[in-house]
Image (tube, rainbow, N blue to C red):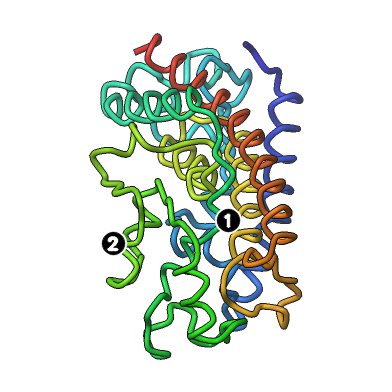
C-alpha cells in the first residue's frame, strides 16, 4: 500500500495528537513529582515511555511517498529509496528480531484458540497481599477496603485459578500454594487465555516490543485497552481507591462478581480483536523475511 504525502502526514499527526491526549496525565504528574497507582502502571511496569509511544510507524507493506524529511525516515529498520519513498525493511527486521516475532505470533494464536474464562474475579490482586503484614502490602499508601483480616478471608473462601505467570509471581508466599494452577514462563503459551486481564494488557506489551514494525494505530489501540483493563483490575482489587474517583467492584459479593465477569468478557472480545490484528502483522513480517 502506498500513502501519498498528505495521507501519511495526516495519519502521523493524528497519532501524535492521540498519544499526547492519552499520556497527558502521566506527563503532568511526572513534572509535578506526583504518582498515580493505577494510571502510572502502564509506564512503570510496561517499559515504554510517552515519547516512544508518540512515534508513529506505518507498519509492514506500507510505503510513504515523498517522505525524505519524515521522522519515519530516520527510524531504525526503515529504508529510503532513490525516489524519496520510505518503507519498513521487513527482511532486516526479521533477520534481527525474527525469534521474537515468531514467539509473539505463536503465543497470540494459542491464546486466540482458547475460550475465555471470566470467573477469576481479579483475585490475583488479593493474593498479592494475602497474609501480608501492613508494611508488606504493595500499595501501602492505600487502605484495604475490608482490612487485612477481611481481605484474607476473601482469599480463603474463593478458588484461586490464576493462569498468568506475571501475576502469579507476585503472589505472597502464603498465597502461592492456594493457586490451583502453577504457571511458569515455560508454560506461558500453553496456559494464557483471552479472559485473563493481564494477558489482555500484555497485548500492548507485544505491540511495543515489536516496534517499529507495528502500525502506530494498533499500538495506541492496545494501550487504550490496557488502560481500561488496568482500571477494572484496580477497582476490583482489595484497595480502597475511592479518593482517586474509582468506585470499587465488590467481587466478594454476587453483584460484584456479575459486574466483573461482564466487563471481563467485553475485554476478552476487545483483546482478541487486537490479537488477530497483531498476528496479521507478524505473518506479514515473517512472509517478507
Q: Which x, y percent locates residue 223?
A: 60, 47
Where the C terminus falls, by quadrant? Answer: top left
Q: Secondary structure at mark 2?
A: helix
- Which residue in the structure is indicated by mark 2? 177
Say if 150 sits above or below 214 in the image: below
- Tell me if residue 123 comes above or below residue 149 in the rendering: above
Looking at this view, is 64 or 20 the one in front? 20
Disc 2 residue crowd, few under 14, some 14–19, many 20+, Cα 10 Å: few
Element marked by disc 1 = loop
* 145 left or right, relative to 80: right
Q: Disc 1 and disc 2: Cα gap in Å?
A: 18 Å
Crowding at mark 1 (Cα within 10 Å: few <14, some 14-19, many 20+): many
Q: Position of residue 109 (x, y in %)?
A: 44, 23
Quadrant occupied by the N terminus: top right
Q: Residue at x 34, y 68 (%)?
A: 175
Residue at point 33%, 48% (across, down)? 181
Report the side of 183 relative to 87 (left or right).
left
Give the percent coordinates (x, y) of residue 201: 53, 48
Quarter holding residue 3: top right
Looking at this view, is 239 or 72 the one in front? 239
Q: Residue at x 48, y 27 (%)?
A: 114
Residue carrying label 1: 121
Whichever of labels 1 and 2 marks the residue nearer the N terminus, that label is 1
Q: Who is closer to the viewer here, 14 or 181?
A: 181
Amino acid at each position: 500500500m502506498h500513502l501519498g504525502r498528505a495521507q501519511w502526514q495526516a495519519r502521523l499527526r493524528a497519532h501524535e495528537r492521540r498519544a499526547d491526549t492519552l499520556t497527558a496525565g502521566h506527563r503532568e504528574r511526572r513534572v509535578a513529582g506526583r504518582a498515580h497507582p493505577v494510571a502510572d502502571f502502564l509506564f512503570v511496569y510496561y517499559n515504554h515511555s510517552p515519547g516512544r509511544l508518540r512515534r508513529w510507524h506505518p507498519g509492514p507493506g506500507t510505503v510513504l511517498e515523498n517522505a525524505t524529511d519524515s521522522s519515519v525516515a530516520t527510524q531504525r529498520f526503515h529504508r529510503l529509496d532513490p525516489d524519496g519513498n520510505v518503507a519498513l525493511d521487513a527482511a532486516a527486521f526479521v533477520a534481527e528480531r525474527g525469534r521474537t516475532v515468531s514467539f509473539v505470533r505463536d503465543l497470540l494464536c494459542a491464546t486466540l484458540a482458547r475460550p475465555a474464562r471470566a470467573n477469576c474475579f481479579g483475585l490475583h490482586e488479593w493474593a498479592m497481599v494475602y497474609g501480608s503484614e501492613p508494611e508488606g502490602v504493595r500499595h501501602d499508601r492505600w487502605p484495604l477496603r475490608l482490612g487485612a483480616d477481611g481481605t484474607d478471608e476473601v482469599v480463603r473462601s474463593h478458588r484461586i485459578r490464576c493462569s498468568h505467570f506475571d501475576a502469579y509471581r507476585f503472589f505472597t508466599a502464603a498465597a502461592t500454594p492456594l493457586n490451583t494452577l502453577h504457571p511458569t514462563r515455560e508454560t506461558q503459551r500453553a496456559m494464557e487465555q483471552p479472559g485473563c486481564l493481564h494477558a489482555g494488557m500484555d497485548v500492548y506489551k507485544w505491540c511495543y516490543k515489536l516496534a517499529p514494525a507495528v502500525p502506530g494505530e494498533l499500538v495506541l489501540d492496545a494501550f487504550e485497552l490496557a488502560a481500561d483493563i488496568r482500571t477494572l483490575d484496580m477497582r476490583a482489587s482489595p484497595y480502597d481507591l475511592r479518593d482517586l474517583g474509582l468506585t470499587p467492584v465488590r467481587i466478594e459479593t454476587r453483584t460484584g462478581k456479575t459486574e466483573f465477569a461482564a466487563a471481563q468478557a467485553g475485554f476478552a472480545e476487545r483483546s482478541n480483536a487486537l490479537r488477530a490484528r497483531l498476528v496479521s502483522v507478524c505473518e506479514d513480517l515473517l512472509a517478507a523475511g
